[in-house]
Amino acid sequence: MKPTKPKPLLNLAAALVLGGLFGLIGPMVYEFFFRRVRCRDDFDRDFGVPVLVEFGPHPTGASA
């Protein structure tokens, strides 16, 4: 019988595939569960509440 050895190429391939999978799927799942309201259409679509007031962009320190 031969002893089992660590297989570095198999471990590297598995790490690359799983790391890439978690790196792509993780942020998508996070965004799905914790959505941000970025515009009035997001608010209306997600919550079903009509928007009565919309503020303009916030001025930065240089232009204020």
Image: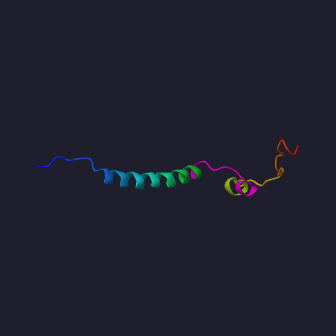
> For the point 32% across and 54% down, which residue is it?
9
Quadrant in the picture for the C terminus: top right
Residue lying at the far right of the rendered structure: 64
> For the point 74% across and 53% down, which residue is it?
49
19 and 38: which one is in front?
19
Q: Position of residue 5 (x, y in %)?
A: 23, 47
19 and 26: which one is in front?
19
Q: Position of residue 29 (x, y in %)?
A: 53, 52
Left or right: residue 58 compared with residue 43: right
> For the point 14% across and 49% down, which residue is it?
2
Q: Position of residue 55 (x, y in %)?
A: 83, 50
Left or right: residue 16 compared with residue 45: left
Residue 35 magenta: yes
Left or right: residue 35 compared with residue 9: right
Magenta extent: 32-42
23 and 12: which one is in front?
12
> For the point 87% across and 46% down, which residue is it?
63
Colour scheme of the picture: rainbow
17 and 48: which one is in front?
17
